Amino acid sequence: MAQPAHKRSASPSATRSRKPAVDPKKKRTTAISQSAMPTVGAIPTPKVAEMIGEIRIAAGPAFSAATRLKVAGMNTAFEKEKHSITLDKPIVEQIRELFGERPLSASINDLLQSALVQHRLGVLVDQMEEEAGPASAEAYDRVFSQWFEEG
Amino acid sequence: MVRRGVAKARPAPWPSLVLDSEGLWAVARNDSEAARAALSASRTAGVPVVVPSVILAETLYGDQRDARANQALKNLVVLPTTEHMARMAALLKRQSGMRGVKATIDALVVATSIDLGGSAILTSDVGDIDRLAAVFADLRIKAISV
């Protein structure tokens, strides 16, 4: 997991599930309405500025990989299948600690999804490195320098 | 399990990695060291690597030539383009003053990054992507050249 576990409980999705005291019409943190579209030249209207602010909030450090995918549209339309599973008690306690009052099934579902996504990525990277060798230190430098480049 | 190259892999500083058409082909053909570095770093950091669904329409041929791309896509996250992303892309195009089909697809890629809360974008179109991303200067969205 990319984010420290203790930060996830404060994630926007966790907050949403507890019926936050924000405008109930705003179901998604990054929701955009038609009225947010008009702008005057390159200067964002207040509505657009508000939208930018909401997106920045959504990008906060507590935004886990699983939450990112969920907010962006993943994992919203899948049919559910009911199962009875047995978990180690300490694991369940940690999940409850991480996700707070969020339903256990949804929390486990998100964690599993994130784990599967990472597993599949690992399979792909292993295949690529098997075929062409790992990237050089210089390649990492080039890629990272572009990310940190200003402007 | 022993993984080759893990000793050199560094954790990615970006919160997610988005592939555009050239980014996807660089991964599929496996002919870009930058692509391998970006994916390996993403794996090390545990961040998702995402392909916007609209990129499939732009990139794939719909026949056997897609075999390598399909092989890569099996292990990547294909993210549907939502109405929210489409509206965001329209906003990006307008504010960046860009037009045309290519700009529309680039804008959808950047809109996907915005929806993810910022990301690196693996692309050959660094200039266009950075120009669109500049509209949302509060979010860190950076093009990384294949």
Image (tube, rainbow, N blue to C red):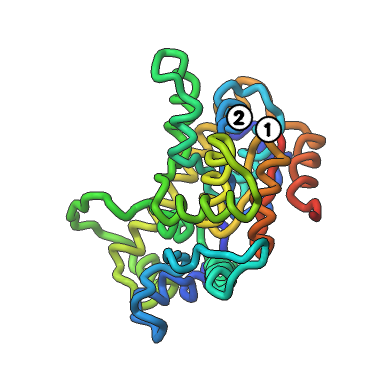
Q: Disc 2, disc 1: CB below 8 Å? A: yes
Which of the two residues, A38 or A6, is positioned nearer the viewer here? A38
Q: Secondary structure at mark 1?
A: loop
- Percent position (x, y) of residue A69? 45, 54
Residue at the image point whose x is 21% and y is 53% from the top? A80
Residue at the image point whose x is 53% and y is 38% from the top? A122
Identified by mark 2, the residue type is Glu
Numbered label attached to residue B124: 1
**Label 1 is found on which chain of the structure?**
B
- Percent position (x, y) of residue B15? 60, 55
Identified by mark 1, the residue type is Ser
Residue at the image point whose x is 68% and y is 26% from the top? B32
Residue assigned mark 2: B22
- Percent position (x, y) of residue A27? 36, 70
- Give residue B128's quadrant in the image: top right
Q: Is residue B105 left or right of residue A148?
A: left
Q: Quadrant of the N terminus of chain B?
A: top right
10 Å crowding of disc 1: few (<14), some (14-19), many (20+): some
Residue A64, placed above or below residue A139: below
